[in-house]
Image (tube, rainbow, N blue to C red):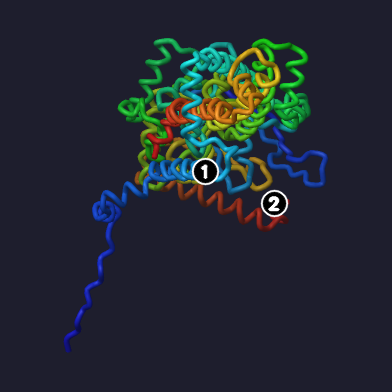
């Protein structure tokens, strides 16, 4: 008696599937396509909303105002002032935040000491800090710098402290057994282990800090993006106001994508190498 | 001269609470310089706790421990753990250097020497994640020897590896030890492994007391397939069986 064997359909490997997928399909399903789609959707939404409501300036008007501001020579000076204040504030918040976060993560006593002040600082909104610093330091660079610092530092501290507490117990025990000095433990064990948390903290610092700097400039005057945005707001010209907001938000997005993202990728190259 | 001396050591976890449990009781022994001592016993008899106490990771409840060094300064310890415990974000060479006292040329040279002895010279710039489990454990062994320890502690270093890799590493460990003659305290639950590697085996019984202290007087290098090694392994296993039987019938101990 003879038996007929039905051939089993062979399953395709991932490389075969990859080869069989057309190029256009790969492009359309890529991460980059998703990002571009999100930007286009937002832009389309903006165009529609501005067409429906007279008080929402459209993209063309905003660009026109931006060109006007450039031609008046207002952009570089004001943008430079804001960038300087923002940069100093965020840098200070990063340094202080990492130091305090490491102390809170490593020491029970440090945690007990800093926990309540950090909690209080977290609950104070940027607008309150901007009022206070303008009252304390007047209309100079110091108010926006301190506001940026105070609004962003608690976020860096909380992230770093959480990261330090999560450092592998096994690696800490190994370091204790070999009597590795504290400075080397912090440099080679703690800081690399918390890089992701530090990066998240700096991202928060940037996002929260820019609120702070703009509010302090808005209320404190003395030039800057916040000051110019308020100038246009007071003049009831929303196109000019939106132009400055778009300029600064665009800068933050580019900073995040082209600087912070690359720094993080470099810090985690060991993970890519291991994959 | 004894490198490690332990007298009447005891360890109780959760002292002063209803959950208090004594894991080590009246442990006394010393380890002479240049010897390889294994501590064997069933799971939960306190082997790893004893090693953690010697290393300083864990504190003992009572008794004395003293460590001496040839240099007269504080005793230097190396530790090979069950898992390699390498910093994943540092290269193999940087992991070796992480535990060293200094960054001198001599120290770098010593690290290279031990990496060569475990056959990983070409992998010095690799991240640990780029190595197999066996290779990572070899880095752990090289790291421990490279600190030139007065006392080297090893806690079941081959238990997470497959049989073939473990056998290769045991042979490699014997070779390195024969050249360096470091003082080693090696914890294992594998009697066969202990007989192959050790000059002396301390058997711990459940409850954390020393049951027996056995001297292994066999020529080196040893291989598990040698008839004399196999005979001795069978003998030690037999004694462990006796210990287990006694533990099952408490009146026999009394």
Marks 2/1 in contact by CB < 8 Å: the verdict is no
Residue B26 occupies which quadrant of the picture?
Answer: top right
The residue labelled by disc 1 is A51
Pointer 2 chain: B
Mark 2 sits on what residue? B253
x, y percent for residue A125? 72, 30
Task: Quadrant for the N terminus of chain B, please.
Answer: top right
On the picture, is A32 further left or further right than B20? left
Location of residue B69 in the rendering, given as x and y in whole percent from the top left corner? 56, 16
The single residue placed furthest to the left in the displayed view is A2
Give the x, y percent position of residue B20. Answer: 77, 44
User: Image quarter for residue A134?
Assistant: top right
Same-chain status of marks 2 and 1: no
Residue A82 in sight here: yes
Q: Residues within 10 Å of mark 2 (few under 14, many from 20)?
A: few
Seen at 70% across and 25% down, the residue is A107
- Between disc 2 and disc 1, the foreground one is 1
Q: Quadrant of residue A181?
A: top right
Indicate the chain on which mark 1 is placed: A
- Point out residue A222 in the picture as x, y percentages from the top left corner: 65, 12
Above or below: residue A160 compared with residue A51: above
Using the image as rendered, state which of residue B208 and residue B55 is in the foreground. Answer: B55
| SS at badge 2 | helix
């Amino acid at each position: 008696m003879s038996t007929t064997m039905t051939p089993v359909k062979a399953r395709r490997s991932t490389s075969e599937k990859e080869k069989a997928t057309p190029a256009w399909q790969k492009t359309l399903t890529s991460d980059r396509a998703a990002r571009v789609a999100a930007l286009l959707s937002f832009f389309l939404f903006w165009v529609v909303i501005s067409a429906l409501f007279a008080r929402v300036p459209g993209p063309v008007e905003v660009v026109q105002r931006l060109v006007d501001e450039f031609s008046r020579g207002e952009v570089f000076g004001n943008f430079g002032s804001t960038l300087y204040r923002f940069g100093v504030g965020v840098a200070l918040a990063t340094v202080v935040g990492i130091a305090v976060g490491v102390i809170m993560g490593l020491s029970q006593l440090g945690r007990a000491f800093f926990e309540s002040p950090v909690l209080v600082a977290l609950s104070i909104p940027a607008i309150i800090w901007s009022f206070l610093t303008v009252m304390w330091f007047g209309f100079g660079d110091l108010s926006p710098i301190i506001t940026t610092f105070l609004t962003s530092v608690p976020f860096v501290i909380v992230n770093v402290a959480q990261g330090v507490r999560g450092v592998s117990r096994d690696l800490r025990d190994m370091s204790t057994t070999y009597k590795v000095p504290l400075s080397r433990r912090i440099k080679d064990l703690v800081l690399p282990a918390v890089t992701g948390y530090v990066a998240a903290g700096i991202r928060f610092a940037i996002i929260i800090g820019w609120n702070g700097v703009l509010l302090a400039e808005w209320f404190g005057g003395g030039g800057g993006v916040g000051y110019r945005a308020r100038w246009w707001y007071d003049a009831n010209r929303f196109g000019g106001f939106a132009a400055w907001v778009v300029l600064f938000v665009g800068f933050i997005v580019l900073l995040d994508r082209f600087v912070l993202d690359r720094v993080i990728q470099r810090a985690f190259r060991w993970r890519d190498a291991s994959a | 001269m004894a490198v490690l001396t332990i007298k009447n050591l005891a360890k109780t976890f959760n002292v002063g609470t209803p959950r208090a449990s004594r894991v080590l009781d009246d442990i006394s022994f010393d380890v002479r310089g240049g010897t390889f001592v294994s501590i064997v016993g069933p799971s939960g008899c306190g082997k790893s706790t004893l090693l953690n106490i010697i290393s300083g990771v864990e504190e003992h409840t009572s008794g004395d421990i003293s460590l001496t060094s040839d240099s007269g300064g504080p005793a230097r310890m190396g530790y090979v753990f069950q898992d390699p415990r390498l910093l994943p974000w540092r290269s193999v060479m940087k992991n070796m250097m992480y535990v060293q006292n200094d960054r001198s040329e001599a120290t770098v040279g010593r690290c290279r020497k031990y990496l060569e002895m475990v056959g990983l010279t070409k992998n010095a710039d690799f991240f640990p994640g780029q190595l197999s489990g066996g290779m990572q454990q070899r880095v752990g062994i090289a790291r421990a020897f490279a600190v030139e320890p007065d006392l080297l502690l090893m806690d079941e270093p081959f238990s997470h590896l497959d049989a073939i890799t473990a056998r290769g590493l045991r042979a490699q460990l014997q070779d390195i030890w024969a050249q360096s003659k470091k003082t080693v305290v090696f914890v294992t639950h594998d009697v066969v492994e202990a007989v192959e590697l050790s000059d002396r085996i301390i058997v711990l019984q459940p409850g954390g007391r020393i049951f027996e202290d056995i001297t292994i007087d066999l020529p080196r290098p040893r291989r598990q397939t040698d008839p004399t090694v196999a005979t001795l392994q069978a003998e030690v296993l037999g004694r462990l069986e006796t210990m287990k039987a006694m533990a099952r019938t408490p009146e026999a101990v009394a």
